[in-house]
Amino acid sequence: MAGRKLGFWRRLAVLLVLPAMSLWTKRTWTGMENLPPGGGFIITPNHMSQFDPLVVAHYIYESGRWPRFLAKASIWRVPFVGFMLRKTQQIPVERGSVEAVKSLDSLIEALHEGGVVVIYPEGTTTREPDLWPMRGKTGAARLALVTGAPVVPMATWGAQAVHDVRSGRIRVGRRVPVQVTVGKPVDLSRWQGEAPTRAVLEQMTEAIQLATRNLLAELRDEAPPPLYEVSRRAWRPGADDAGDRGRQSEGQDDMRGGGA
């Protein structure tokens, strides 16, 4: 850990966030041995709370790597937050626009540099009533097919006790139990060399999301339900999928899956 060259801004982010996370959460972390020991790879967590990106970032940092999140570009317009996101090498995606293609280029570059890219395939916090994963968008699968980078499934549980999207309640306290685990990279070898058709990308995404769902079932010690599907009419007003109404191309839609 001490040997990493973080630079001023990333070190500042660690100094701002890490002490709070250490006080705020009681962590149970497993599966770090499943992370590739080097090179670039993609992590695909479930997304059930606006707090879980901090939990995911903490886990990846303590594994000895630096997380680079794909997140909706609107966050970059928040004063100071956007500035720190730029300085710490996070990657914005402007949903439903030609700028989404630039996000794909940035992700490819990050992986080629040996980075750890975090993509939320659901593209938003889950709408499943019991916080199980939904079916995902295909951005992570497309990136894996283009680069050949491993896709590592991750499951988190407990962040909903800090911020529950169903009620909007935020709990401020100490030592909230949170669990994180990762599995072995998803076996996507059967699609290697395939053209990135919608059918291929959806099959790959299904494999990725099922791996994440099964990890979450282990954390919760419950039998998992099928991946949740939600109609557009079921989304809450102002939900993160507003870009669905402005799809401009298959590739642009793919890269929308990743907003925190």
Image (spheres, helix red, strand yellow):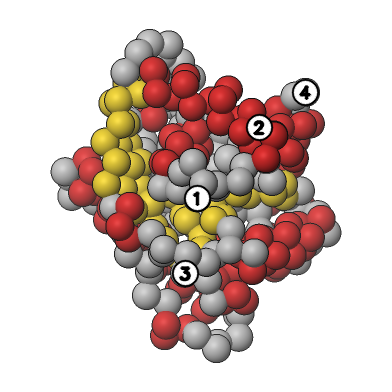
Label 2 is placed on what type of residue? Answer: Gly
Tag in front: 3 or 1 = 1
Residue at the (28%, 52%) spot, across then down: 31
Mark 3 or 2: the one toward you: 3
Q: Amino acid at mark 4?
A: Pro
Report which quarter residue 102 is drawn in.
Answer: bottom right
The circle on residue 79 is: 4
The answer to whether one can see residue 74 in this image is no
State the image coordinates of residue 131 (x, y, percent, origin top left): 36, 38
Q: Nearer the viewer, mark 1 or mark 4?
A: 1
Please identify the quadrant where the C terminus is shown: top right
Q: CA distance from mark 2 to mark 4?
A: 21 Å
List the single residue furthest toward the front. Answer: 3
Give the total of numbered labels: 4
Give the spatial CA distance, label 1 vs label 4.
Answer: 27 Å
Q: As shown in the figure, which amino acid type bears the numbered disc 3? A: Pro
| Structural distance between the alpha carbons of marks 3 and 1 | 15 Å
On the image, the x and y values in percent for residue 184 come to 32, 64
**Distance (Cα) linking label 3 and label 4:** 34 Å
Q: Secondary structure beneath disc 1?
A: loop
Q: State the residue lying farthest toward the bottom.
A: 193
Determine which residue is flagged by label 1. Answer: 65
Identify whether 176 is placed above or below 208: above
| Residue 60, image x, y percentages | 45, 46
- Mark 3 or mark 4: name the one nearer the start of the chain: 4
Q: Earlier in the sequence, mark 3 or mark 1?
A: 1
Circles 2 and 4, Cβ within 8 Å, touching? The answer is no
What residue sits right under mark 3 in the picture? 150
Q: From mark 3 to mark 2, how far is it between C-alphas?
A: 33 Å
Numbered tag placed on residue 161 in the rendering:
none
Circles 3 and 2: CB atoms closer than 8 Å:
no
Tell me which numbered mark, 2 or 4, is placed earlier along the sequence. Answer: 4
